[in-house]
Structures are given as structure tokens and as C-alpha cells.
Image (tube, grey):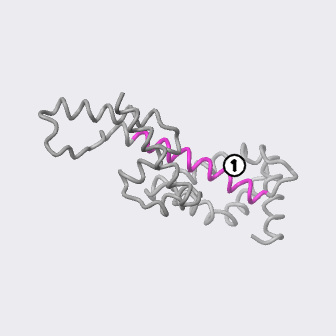
Amino acid sequence: MSKVDVNLVNKCLFKIAYGDEKAVTVLFHALSPTLRYIARKYIPDKEQAEDLVQDFWADIEKIAKGFVRAENGFNYLVKVMNRRAINRYKKLSKEKARVRPVDLELDGRCEDFSEKYALQQMVQSALEKLEEVERIIIEESYFENKTVREIGKDLDIPKSTVARIKQKALDKLKTLLKE
């Protein structure tokens, strides 16, 4: 974003903080594509991503009041949207985890449904004990079949870091499941 645009965003944020509704429209036209991109980066469902963007705009006055004058307004808004998108992603991941049990292919090792269900519950419980980023990486890797590179792009971290965290999480899961 150019220097002029950053100044425009900063001015709009100050005006919005003091109740100027016209500044919201100006800011909306300047930032909507960027905010939609961020939402879609984390939330694959188009409607849910759009809901996230609308929630952002609904809270714009509160967001503007949290802006510090010395900051870059564009970067501030991008960080706010990133945090909101990550939090929404985590919330949706937890909801999915509750709705769908971990589906394991057990190759006949479980004699009946109750054994399979107990094993699924053990795995689910072990996943919940992982740190948030570890759980996200494991879920994306094994339940969504994403590559380390794709996960790194989603979380905005290097693929080598993703691979390291994934291995650490697998080691933790192995330990937890042996208990």
C-alpha cells in the first residue's frame, strides 16, 4: 500500500473513532478486497468468510478506537483481521471436531463399535491436550490432507517450522496415547 493510502487509512481510522460515518465508507472501499482475502485465507467456506468480514465492519468503531496514532493504520487493520480470522478458524475447527468424531481406519483391530468409539475418544482427548498450533497442524495435515507447504501458507510460518511442530505434536500424541 502506498504512503498516500496509508495516510488515508490513518485519517479514516481517526474520523471513525470520533463517529464520522463517511469515513467508514471510504475505508470500506479501500480495504474490503484485502479483508476478504484474509478471511478466505483462513475460512474456506465463502459464506462464513463473508460473515467474518461483516463482523469486522460491524465492530469498526471499536477497532478504530483501539488504534494508536503512531502506528500504520493499514498494518493495524490487517493484524486485527488476521487475529479474528485465526480465532474464527479455531472456533470452527473445534465445532467440526465435536460434530465429527475422528474417523480411524482400524483394519479390523476393533471387534465392535464400542471399542472403535473408545479409541476415537482417546485420540480426540489426546488432540485436545496439544497446543493450539500443534492441533491445527495435525488436523490440517491428517483430516484435511494439506501439505506442510499449504499449512505453512495458511498459518504464515515457514514450512520447516511446520514440519518441526508436526513431528513434536506426533511425538506428544504417541506419548499421550500410550498412557
Residue located at (61% from left, 66% from top): 33
Is 45 one of the magenta-colored residues? Answer: no
Query: From the viewer's perspective, is residue 1 above or below residue 66?
Result: below
Image coordinates of residue 135 in percent, x first then y, are: 46, 43
Front-most of residues 92 and 172: 172
Image coordinates of residue 140 in percent, x first then y, are: 42, 52
Please give left or right for residue 19 compared with residue 127 in the image.
right
Residue located at (84% from left, 58% from top): 11
Is 80 one of the magenta-colored residues? Answer: yes
User: In which quadrant will I find the N terminus?
Assistant: bottom right
Residue, disc 1: 60
Image coordinates of residue 21 in percent, x first then y, are: 74, 53
| Numbered range of the magenta stretch | 73-95
User: What's the amino acid at mark 1?
Assistant: Ile
Residue located at (32% from left, 31% from top): 122
User: In which quadrant will I find the C terminus?
Assistant: top left
